[in-house]
Amino acid sequence: MEKRERKRKFPVKREEIKRAYKMRKRRFSSSQIIMLSFMGVILLGSMLLMLPWATKERGGASFLDALFTATSAACVTGLVTQDTATYWSVFGKAVILCLIQIGGLGVITIAILITRLSGRKIGLMQRSTMQEAIAAPQMGGIVRLTAFIFKTVLAIEAFGAVLLMPAMIPRFGVIRGIGYSAFHSVSAFCNAGFDLMGVNGKYSSLTAFTADPLVNIVIMFLIISGGIGFLTWDDMRKNKWRIHRYRMQSRVIVVVTVILLVLPAVYFYFCEFGRDVWSGMTTSERILSAMFQSVTLRTAGFNTVDLTQMTEPGQMIMILLMLVGGSPGSTAGGMKTTTLAVLIATAAAVFKRRPNAHLLGRRIPGDTAHYAATVLMMYLSLFLAGGIFIGYAEGIPMMPALFEAASAIGTVGLSLSGTPTFGAASKLVLIALMFMGRVGGMTIVYAALSRKKPYVSELPQEKIMVG
């Protein structure tokens, strides 16, 4: 009798083990959660923007326009197929603003914050996903860091909105001025590039404020604040101006950011805005314009001058800056400043015949250099493939086509060729580039290959000459 009981119970136990194993296999990886979260937010935003009351003219937006706008907002890019100010209603603009905020902070950051406010326990899986989403070096203290990020974001955006009010209220009245100040503060901090200045002229961005130092300086401050990364803020909070105490990553970000702000600004001032085509600008306007373009090109998407008047060398420099983008764990996209630093350090190590790359007195692991090279290859491949396709499909010169592709993959939002005039195929390519640029090409690859078994053996080694 006892043996029968054992036999009867054993299969049940085995079935439970099988079920638990299947549940474990179905669990999503951190990369899959990040990718699916962004996709969910984009689809929800698209449906909301298709509602009849989302546009000023009743009837709602087409699916492609809604999907493009939702992707651009959630991926904090700024490319648009319809002028934001004149096409979307107040409801539509509110949806776009929410998507920008969620995309800038990160879907996972918002979800963790809501979970914490509701009093629910945050598990190990959520902490691991949050660590990957904000590029944190360790899981310890990740929940406290999330709370700090959220408070800092709200404080900086509110501060930026207040500073913009003296410029916006006289132009648009009290209510609209306050609303416009808040919208542009959030858009600038999240490096989104969406604007409501279409009331001055469709797709005019901030060209009406070329000579306004207040608007230029505030927008630049917000863009830089959002683009340096959440961990750099944490170092600033803990160590203030004692930069030598920052994490190495934060120090690299600060150094590379300063270089990428100063050198392009010098080039734009002397080589671009010194040309006869800009002769109507005063010296102060040239300085502001040179500084602003240097800042906004690294994923922000606002512009204060007509970029089509730039020379082709200048436009090429813009493309390179757009591809570099901001810093890890920030509101910005692109390859990231740290990737550029690792690539340069790796090249320097090869020139000097060193076995490892060095940065600021520290040795860089070999797998980090491999990762940086892979990211570079992915971004260049997507950028070139997208640019070639758009150039062929739209019948436009290669420079505007490559500029458009770089703007999308770098989540910048600037355009030379007029995105609204593109066909459906080119818009779908830009949607894919914006998504991959914000979520990250490597995140998508890891999401697709996360269930692949790791290699347990190695193939025979043989040397191959390169270079």
Image: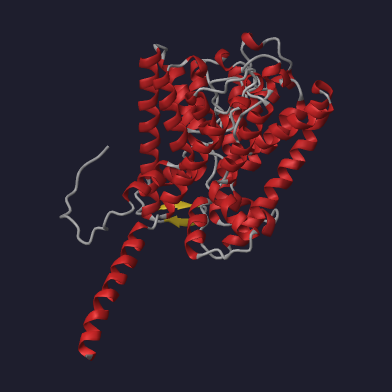
Residue at 61% x, 54% y is 114
Residue at 32% x, 66% y is 19
Q: Quadrant of residue 343?
A: top left
Q: Residue furthest bottom?
A: 2
Res 73 visible = yes
Compared across the picture, whether 200 is left or right of 320 comes to right
Q: Residue furthest front?
A: 1
Compared across the picture, whether 238 is left or right of 167 comes to left
Compared across the picture, whether 295 is left or right of 131 comes to right
| Image quadrant occupied by the N terminus | bottom left
Please say if 186 is above or below 286: below
Snapshot colouring: secondary structure
Q: Position of residue 439 (x, y in %)?
A: 47, 42
Q: Nearer the viewer, residue 18 or 369?
A: 18
| Image quadrant occupied by the C terminus | top left
Res 356 visible = no
Q: Position of residue 49 (x, y in %)?
A: 57, 29
Please say if 455 is above or below 189: below
Count of labels shown?
0
Please say if 238 is above or below 189: below
Q: Quadrant of residue 296?
A: top right
Q: Position of residue 145 (x, y in %)?
A: 62, 58
Q: Position of residue 78 (x, y in %)?
A: 57, 28
